[in-house]
Image (cartoon, rainbow, N blue to C red):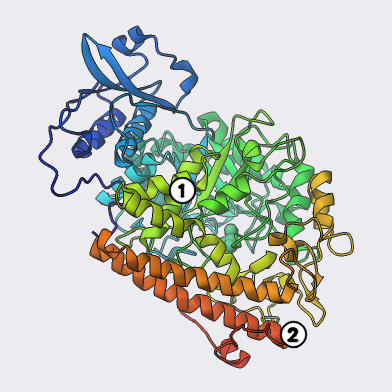
């Protein structure tokens, strides 16, 4: 096994006797019902020795209607799976209001069996809490994936639209199995070429493959496309010619892709063009595109990831400063896409202050599934706890309100809701660069379906499906996974540090970098370490970013004593001698955290070694090798960071702590010119 099957392994132990294949009947011959039935036949081995017949039918089917099940509440995508009697026969019914719901129900049924559930008394009901559950592929047209660590882009733009690699179908199956219903095919740092006729035809071919699986295609739109491929002199969103160009372009796309989802836009961020180039607002830009897609039912996902070279203010504040005043000015079919934190996908960030601050605007959350800042594909870091931590964060605007409540639209009554994940998928046989990275794709989909699911239950499902539904493997694997992201935080960015990674590719430690053009590209900008202390003062005496949170939370965060220690250095510049809850000084606490991060990885290696008899050889060996790499690199992170902090604070290591293996100059001399994923 090489991991190609992901969590869709419909296996039983080799010794199990031959089973009867369940009869699967789909009422209605639609592409979606067809693939649902096919999937169940594919998983036939899971159904035991005397499986009941399976019926796939929507609420409008006469037999289903006669059962008078409470299906209306399931909405468009929810499902219900249970045993019923139809025509005097026990039948396992998978039903929903739509074909897509039936497909999701079929996958839920398979998951139930794969995780050890039985068919007797089966009763599965679920509806997604979030409407747009979307992957963002940062895939370039030349096949390079920005921040991709799992090989080249899955999309072979060169052979599309003619050749539809069967892998596109497996991609769609995997996504549908976890409820993902949209995919943005191209990088947010977009090329206008994606919007030319040949590329529209290529995207249309992918859309055809994905359609039966309930997955819509979206494109990242380059704001200056009217100039680059339209021959116009401007891309000013208020220029009628520009609006007309986008309208015509959009109509052209919809002629090839009738259910095209819409556009994702990165504007006026990191050198991308946008409405600000014409002194127009982000809302002007978004609304112009929204008008073009609206007649077709399309939407615009407009990113709030902005910070400007010319703005001397704290980078963490800039998106809020720019977008908060625009609340209520976006068209109905615009949703603003906000990263989970205010900087950039760090191992830990406090939740973005825009959540809860724009009640009149739908906001979707953007997570990074690919591990740009968490050790690339080689480090084992299960991101479920990170997603859950952000989603469960209380905004403190109204009692109990969490980021998840904002994201699922419930507090503010929005129906356009969404969650985006920057994909970690490439052409590697195991799709995501490692078996455990598959868990992050899985967790993203499951938590987009239901942001309240919880990281551990999702990890248990994944482990049971990926390995076997036995406590002997699930328990230790989940135990490894659950602390793994915290371990990365510990050995890379303990206690609220951020952005101390090396320049450009972000591989490895470089807290010393201070010579890059833009101040906020330099690690020293973020940690502000000096002889007396360390951390970024985001209180009134500093950038006052805390004031962007709701008053009750802002008060908590304004005082180092009431700030959670895990975020201490994010919000405060404090003395190396500050007393921590553990009784240690801050300096000793940092050293302790680095060591516990390294220790956790060493421990994962031991635990994985013990699992060798339970895991197939190929997947076991690759993981074992990667864990060895991770241990070596965790030590490197610890040692390089400590060598640098000591050069700044002039302090000795606490008693018992091991000295770094090399001197600071050695760490500074490490260079990785061909590290993967780095934009060219
Ligand atoms: C950063 C990445 C960069 C992306 C940018 C974005 O380093 O490659 O283009 O985010 O989200 O994390 O637009």
Work out whether residue 298 or residue 119 is closer to the camera in this orientation and state it.
Answer: 119
Residue ID at (69%, 64%): 496
Residue farthest along the right direction in this orientation: 541
Ligand 1 rendered quadrant:
bottom right
Task: Name the residue carrying label 1.
Answer: 443
Q: Where, by quadrant of the figure, is residue 653 drawn?
A: bottom right
667 to 593, vertically: above or below:
below
Identify whether 371 is placed above or below 635: above
Disc 1 CB within 8 Å of nearest ligand 1 atom: no
Percent position of residue 243, x then y: 62, 41
Disc 2 within 8 angstroms of ligand 1 (CB): no
User: Gap between marks 2 and 1, in whole Å?
Assistant: 40 Å
Is the Cβ of the residue at disc 2 closer than 8 Å to that at disc 1?
A: no
Name the residue rendered at 40%, 13% in the picture.
69
Q: Give 103 or 260, whichever is nearer the viewer.
A: 103
Q: Secondary structure at mark 2?
A: helix
Can residue 177 be seen by looking at this rendering?
yes
- Quadrant placement of the N terminus: bottom left
| Count of marks placed on residues | 2
> Which of marks 1 and 2 precedes in the sequence?
1
Residue at 39% of width from left, 35% of height from top?
214
Where on the picture, by quarter, is residue 212? Answer: top left
Q: Is residue 280 in view from this perspective?
A: no
Badge 2 is on which residue? 648
Q: Position of residue 497 (x, y in %)?
A: 68, 68
Q: Where is residue 106 shown, x and y percent of the image?
A: 32, 32
Q: Nearer the viewer, residue 529 or 229?
A: 529
Q: Nearer the viewer, residue 399 or 151?
A: 399
Relative to 313, is 652 on the left or the right?
left
Packing grade of label 1 (10 A; few <14, some 14-19, many >=20) is: many
Label 2 packing within 10 angstroms: few (<14), some (14-19), many (20+): some
């Amino acid at each position: 096994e090489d991991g190609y099957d992901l969590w869709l392994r419909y296996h039983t132990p080799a010794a199990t006797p031959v089973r009867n294949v369940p009869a699967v009947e789909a009422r209605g011959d639609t592409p979606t019902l067809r693939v649902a039935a096919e999937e169940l036949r594919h998983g036939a081995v899971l159904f035991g020795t005397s499986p009941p017949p399976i019926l796939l039918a929507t609420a409008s089917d006469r037999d289903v209607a006669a059962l008078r099940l409470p299906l209306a509440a399931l909405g468009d995508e929810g499902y219900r799976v249970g045993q019923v009697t139809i025509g005097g026969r026990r039948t396992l019914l998978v039903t929903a209001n739509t074909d897509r719901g039936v497909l999701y129900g079929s996958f839920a049924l398979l998951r139930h069996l794969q995780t050890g559930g039985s068919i007797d008394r089966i009763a599965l009901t679920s509806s997604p809490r979030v409407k747009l559950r979307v992957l963002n592929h940062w895939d370039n047209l030349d096949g390079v994936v920005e921040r991709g660590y799992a090989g080249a882009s899955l999309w072979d733009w060169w052979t599309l639209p003619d050749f539809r690699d069967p892998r596109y179908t497996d991609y769609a199956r995997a996504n549908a199995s976890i409820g993902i219903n949209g995919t943005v095919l191209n990088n947010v740092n977009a090329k206008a070429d994606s919007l030319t006729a040949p590329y529209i035809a290529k995207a249309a071919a992918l859309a055809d493959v994905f359609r039966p699986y309930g997955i819509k295609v979206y494109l990242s739109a380059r704001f200056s496309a009217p100039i680059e491929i339209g021959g116009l002199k401007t891309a000013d969103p208020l220029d009628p010619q520009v609006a007309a160009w986008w309208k015509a372009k959009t109509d052209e796309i919809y002629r090839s892709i009738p259910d095209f989802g819409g556009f994702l836009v990165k504007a006026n961020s990191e050198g991308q063009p946008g409405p600000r180039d014409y002194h127009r607002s982000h809302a002007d830009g978004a609304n112009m595109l929204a008008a073009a897609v609206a007649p077709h039912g399309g939407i615009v996902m407009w990113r709030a990831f902005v910070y400007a070279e010319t703005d001397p203010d704290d980078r963490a504040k800039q998106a809020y400063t720019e977008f908060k005043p625009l609340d209520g000015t976006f068209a109905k079919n615009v949703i603003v896409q906000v990263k989970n934190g205010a900087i950039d996908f760090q191992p830990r960030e406090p939740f973005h202050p825009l959540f809860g601050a724009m009640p009149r605007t739908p906001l979707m959350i953007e997570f990074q599934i690919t591990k740009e800042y968490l050790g690339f594909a080689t480090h084992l870091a299960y991101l479920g706890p990170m997603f859950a931590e952000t989603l469960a964060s209380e905004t403190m605007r109204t009692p109990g309100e969490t980021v998840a409540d904002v994201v699922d639209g419930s507090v503010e009554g929005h129906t356009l809701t969404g969650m985006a994940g920057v994909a970690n998928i490439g052409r590697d046989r195991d799709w995501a660069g490692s078996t455990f990275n598959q868990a992050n794709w899985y967790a993203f989909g499951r938590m987009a379906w239901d942001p309240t699911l919880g990281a551990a239950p999702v990890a248990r499902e994944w482990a049971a499906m990926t390995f076997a539904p036995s406590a002997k493997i699930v328990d230790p694997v989940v135990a490894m996974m659950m602390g793994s992201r915290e371990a990365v935080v510990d050995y890379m960015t303990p206690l609220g540090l951020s952005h101390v990674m090396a320049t450009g590719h972000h591989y490895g430690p470089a807290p010393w970098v201070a010579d890059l053009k833009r101040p906020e590209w330099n690690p020293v900008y973020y940690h502000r370490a000096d002889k007396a202390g360390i951390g970024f003062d985001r209180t009134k005496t500093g950038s006052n970013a805390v004031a962007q949170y709701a008053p009750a939370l802002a008060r908590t965060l304004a005082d180092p004593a009431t700030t959670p220690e895990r975020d201490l250095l994010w919000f405060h510049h404090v003395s190396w001698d500050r007393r921590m809850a553990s009784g240690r000084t801050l300096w000793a606490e940092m050293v302790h955290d680095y060591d516990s991060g390294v220790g956790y990885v060493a421990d994962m290696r031991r635990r994985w070694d013990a699992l060798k008899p339970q895991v197939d050889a190929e997947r076991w060996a690759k993981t074992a090798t990667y864990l060895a790499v991770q241990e070596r690199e965790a030590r490197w992170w610890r040692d390089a960071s400590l060598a640098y902090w000591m050069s700044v604070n002039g302090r000795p290591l606490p008693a018992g702590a091991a000295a770094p293996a090399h001197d600071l100059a050695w760490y500074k001399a490490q260079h990785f010119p061909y590290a993967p994923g780095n934009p060219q």
